[in-house]
Image (tube, rainbow, N blue to C red):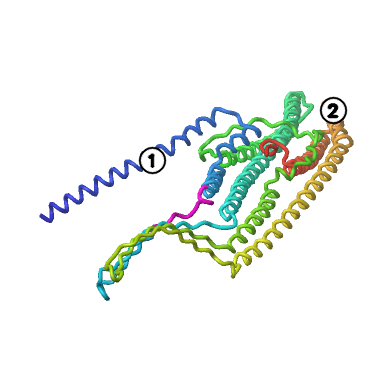
Amino acid sequence: MQRQCAASFFNFELGFFMRTHSIALLGLTVISAPLTGQTLLSTDRIWDKATSIEYALANNTDLGAAKLMIDIAESRLDQTGVLPNPSLELNYANDFAYNNEGEDNFSVGFSQSFPLANRLRKAKAVSRVDIAKAKMEVRQLEISIVESISAIVLEIQIADNRRRSLERLLSSNREIASFIESRIESGEYSQLDANQAKLDALSLEQAINQLNDERSHLTHSLAPLLGLPPETEIEFAESDDIDPMAPLPAYDPNLFERHPEFQLATLDAFSAEAEIALAQSENWEDITAQVFWQNERSVDEPFGLGTDRFVGLKLSLPLPLRKKGDLRANEQRIAQDQARRKAASIKLRVLHEVEHAHHEVEDLQASLASFKDNVITLANTQFEEMRSAYREGQVSFLEFLRTQSQLRDFENDYLDTLESFARARLKLELSLLAGPGLENQ
C-alpha cells in the first residue's frame, strides 16, 4: 500500500513538473519572440543618429519600465479623494441578567465620515503634481538616453574622420611605393627605399584597422540603448566630416520650460505648496453623520411591557483644539523654500554651462580657421611639392618621408582640435536641448 501511494505521489509530482516546465518554456518562447523580431529588424536597416534616437525612445527597456511610473501615479490619483466606506452599526441590549422583565433595545444605523476643509480636493491636487513629476522624470531619462547616444555617435564620427585622413595619406604612400618599385630595376631607387615605403603603408593600414575596430565597438555599444539583444549586429552609416563652420544652436527663451531638471525642482515647490494646504486641512478631523433606526421594549407602569420605535440622526463634530497639521505644514514650507532655491541654482548652472560652451566653441572655431589657413594649407602644399621633387630625383627619400611625417603630425594636431570643437559643440547642443530627441517638450 505504501509503495502504491509513493508511486502515485511520484507520478503526480512528475506530471506537475512536466506541466510547469512546459508552461515555463512557453513563457520563454513568448518573451523571446519580440527580441527575435528586433534582431531581424535591426539587421535590415542602416542606423544614423536620428533613427537611433527615435528607435531608442520607443524601445529602450529602462525607459519602458520608467514610463510605468506615470501609470502608478495616475492610479494613485484614482485612489485619492474617495470618501471612506460607510459603517453599519448594530446595537442590542436586554435585562435578562437583572430584572428579566423582557425589556430590550435594538438599533441599526449607517454612519459616514466626511472630511472637512476640502481635504479630498487638496489630496487630489497633491496627486496631480505627482503625475506631472513622474512625466518629467521620464523625460529626464529620455534626455539622458539621447545624450548617451549623441556621445557615442560623435565618437563614431571622430573615428570616421581620422580614418579618412589616414586613407588619404595611405593612398599617397601607395602611389610613391608603386613609383619606387617601377624604378628599382633601372637603378634609380634601391630596395631599401621600397621596403621603407611598404613599412610606412603597413603602419597606416594598422592605424586604420584600429579605428575600424574602435568604430565596431562603438556601434555595438548602441545596442543596449536601443533595447536590442546583445547578439545584434548594428550597421551604422558613414558619418559626414565635422564642419567647424556649421551654424551653432541659438539660445531658446523657452529653454527652462523644456528643461526636466529645472521643471522637477519647480514641481517640488508646487508639491510642497499642495502639501501645505493638505496639512492645514488636517487640523479639522472628519465629521461623522449617522442615520439609525431603534426599537425599544420597556416596562411602562401601569400598562406593562410596551414597544417604542425611533428614527434618528447623529452628528459628531471635531473640535480643532490641537492643530497638529500646522507642524507638518511648517515642514513643507521649508521644503518649498528648498525647492525654489534648487530651481534657481539649476537655472544659474545651466546658463553658465551654455555661456561657457558657447565661448569654448567660438574660440575653437577661430583656432581651427587659423590652423587650417596658416598651417595645414602650407603643409599640404609643401608635401605636394616635395612629392614632385622626389619624383624628379631632386630630394632624397628620407627628406620626402620627413615631409610626409610632418604633414601627418600637423593633421593629427588639427584633428585633435577639431574633435575638441565637436565635443564642445555637442556640449552646447545638450545644454540648450537642441537636436534630435531634445527639442520636443
* Residue 393: assigned label: 2
Query: Quick one: SS at disc 2?
Result: loop
> For this rendering, which residue is in front, 260 or 160?
260
Q: Quadrant of residue 59?
A: top right
Q: Residue at x 81, y 43 (%)?
A: 358
Q: How many marks?
A: 2
* Residue 27: assigned label: 1
Q: Decide: is 432 above or below 95.
A: above
How far is the residue under mark 2 from the one under mark 1? Answer: 76 Å
Tell me which amino acid carries mark 2.
Answer: Gly
Relative horizontal placement of residue 378, taking residue 261 as reference (left or right): right
The answer to if 37 sits in the magenta stretch is no
Q: Quadrant of residue 237?
A: top right
> For this rendering, which residue is in front, 297 or 230?
297
Relative horizontal placement of residue 285, taking residue 208 as reference (left or right): left
The answer to if 85 sits in the magenta stretch is yes
* Residue 67: assigned label: none
The x, y position of residue 53, in whole percent, is: 63, 36
In what quadrant of the picture does the N terminus appear?
bottom left
Relative horizontal placement of residue 241, taking residue 82 as reference (left or right): right
Q: Is residue 199 visible to the viewer in this orientation of the structure?
A: no
Q: Residue at x 32, y 41 (%)?
A: 22
The stretch of residues the image draws in magenta is: 78-88
Tell me which amino acid carries mark 1.
Answer: Gly
Residue lying at the far front of the rendered structure: 302
Q: Residue at x 73, y 45 (%)?
A: 256
By secondary structure, the bulk of the magenta-drawn segment is best described as loop
> For this rendering, which residue is in front, 191 or 91?
91
The x, y position of residue 34, in whole percent, is: 47, 35
